[in-house]
Amino acid sequence: MKPWIAPALVWLTIQGTGPVLAQASPRSADLGKLSRSLESVVARVGPAVVQIRVTAYGPVAGASGQSALVGPQRSTGSGVILSRDGFIVTNAHVIEGGRRFTVVIPRPAVAGVPSRSSLPPVSQEVPATLVGTDRETDLAVLKVDLTDLPFARLGNSDSLTAGQVVLAFGSPFGLASSVTMGVISAVGRQLRDEDRMIYIQTDTPINPGNSG
């Protein structure tokens, strides 16, 4: 399943620019709590989300425009670190046919200090090896030779309900460390009645490069 949803980004920014002239309304206070909650989630999960660069080999266009030559083909996707010793899960279709894998790990400019610069985040590029894939679930596991990495903990999908707010992390169009927001649209979805796979439907913007 490859969803194609038009991108939509919403920024909710609350900041003081001078003396307070009136007491904030309850609605404004609630919005501030929501914004701080989202910032907290991004701060905790973001460092464990990586970009995956895949190099494969296949037909490329020659001088005459015909695909008569074999050369490198490059693509990108996303992944999430699941252990301190470098195990990373992504989608199987992201790494399919790949011969070389590079993982781009976000790093703060100063250890322990989150980056708040408008410049691209500091990152570390490391080679990865393929541990295994499962085409039925469209999952793959990569391994990098690093330790003491930030990692995310898996949640329980059985606890999800329609209407819950969710965030999507990834690298849409190769833009690393991007976050979008939506809601759970439905749970227990099947593309066909005979499908063995059960999906979670969401309206969160997902674009090429978010896979993983």
Image (tube, helix red, strand yellow):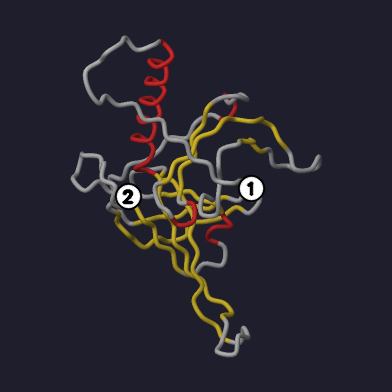
x, y percent for residue 163: 60, 24
Left or right of residue 72: residue 111:
left
Q: Amino acid at mark 1?
A: Pro
Query: 181 or 80, which is in the foreground?
Result: 181
**Could you tell me which secondary element the residue under label 1 belongs to?**
loop
Question: Three-letter amino acid code at disc 2?
Answer: Pro
Structural crowding at the residue carrying mark 2, measured as other residues with C-alpha within 10 Å and reported as few (<14), some (14–19) or many (≥20): many
2 sits to left or right of 83: right
Q: Position of residue 38 (x, y in %)?
A: 40, 29
Query: Mark 2 and mark 1 in contact (Cβ < 8 Å)?
Result: no
Question: Which mark is drawn over residue 87?
Answer: none
Which residue is at a point 28% across and 48% down the rendered structure image?
107
Horizontally, residue 139 falls left or right of residue 82, namely right
The secondary structure type at the circle numbered 2 is: strand
- Residue toward you, 157 or 87: 157
Instruction: Quickly name the residue at label 2.
Output: 106
For residue 123, what is the image quadrant? bottom left
> Hey, which residue is sitting farthest front in the picture?
21
**Residue 166: % across, % down:** 51, 31
For the point 34% across and 47% down, which residue is it?
Answer: 85
Q: Residue at x 26, y 24 (%)?
A: 16
Q: Is residue 164 above or below residue 212?
A: above
Name the residue tied to disc 1.
Answer: 3
